[in-house]
Amino acid sequence: MTTVLTYGTFDLFHIGHLNLINRLRDMGDRLIIAVSTDEFNAGKGKTSVVSYEDRASIINSIKGVDLVIPETSWEQKATDIKEHDVDVFAIGEDWTGKFDALKELCEVVYLPRTDGISSTEIKQMLRVLDPQHITEMQDALAVMSRLLEHYRDLT
Ligand code: C2G
């Protein structure tokens, strides 16, 4: 029985998250995922669009995920590894080297990320659609159409 453990926010769940979870599932027999709480994320300077409860439910409903636990501190990893008898700690390569100290307790693996998708990018795209930006775009369009009318009259 090989137990695999990872940590993440998993906000605005996307294909990058799913690819990672599928890889983790194939690395062992039992998969535990620690989902960052909103309070812990606030400490990371991160705010999630989706609440902890909903993010944890989404992760819990994915095939191959056996247990979801809350991530509330940076220090909990060593305790979690011992408590859940973890064989493999794995996480995306954006954390390469950051958790090498855990090698004393279990295997540590950094996995390739899925290119071209991230929750941060999705948030940036959504931000463009906020009311203020929409008003600015409408104003710009109004100016453009007046300009076009003016040129049409000139020709
Ligand atoms: N990920 C990926 N490909 C992407 C985006 C994310 O493989 N295109 C992986 C990340 O590398 C990470 C996991 O998906 O392993 C979750 O990513 P985040 O939600 O951004 O989690 P993060 O904020 O990195 O939290 O204690 C560690 C932290 O909780 C990690």
Image: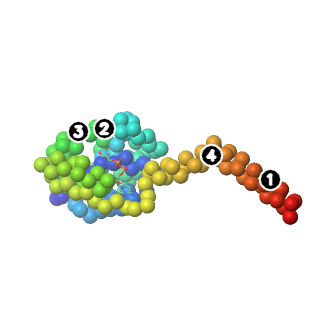
CA–CA distance between discs 1 and 2? 55 Å
* Closer to the eye: label 1 or 2: 1
Among the 4 quarters of the image, the one containing residue 30: bottom left
Asked whether residue 85 appears in the rendered view, the answer is no
Q: Which element type, helix, strand or loop, lies under badge 1?
A: helix
**The residue tagged with tag 4: helix, strand or loop?**
helix
| Secondary structure at numbered mark 3 | loop
Task: Give residue 151's position: percent from left, percent from top.
Answer: 82, 59
Residue 145 on image: x %, y %:
77, 55
For residue 75, the mark is 3
Which residue does the numbered mark 1 point to in the structure image? 146
Q: Which of labels 3 and 2 is toward the front?
A: 3
N-terminal of the pair, mark 2 or mark 4, is 2
Identify the residue under disc 4.
133
Residue 66, percent from left and from top: 28, 53
Query: Which quadrant is home to the N terminus?
Result: bottom left
Do the residues bearing badges 1 and 2 touch, measured as CB atoms within 8 Å?
no
Residue 117: quadrant of the picture: bottom left
Q: Which mark is residue 72?
A: 2
How far apart marks 4 and 3 lie (CA) works out to: 41 Å
Q: Position of residue 76 (x, y in %)?
A: 23, 40
Single out the mark in the foreground, 3 or 1: 1
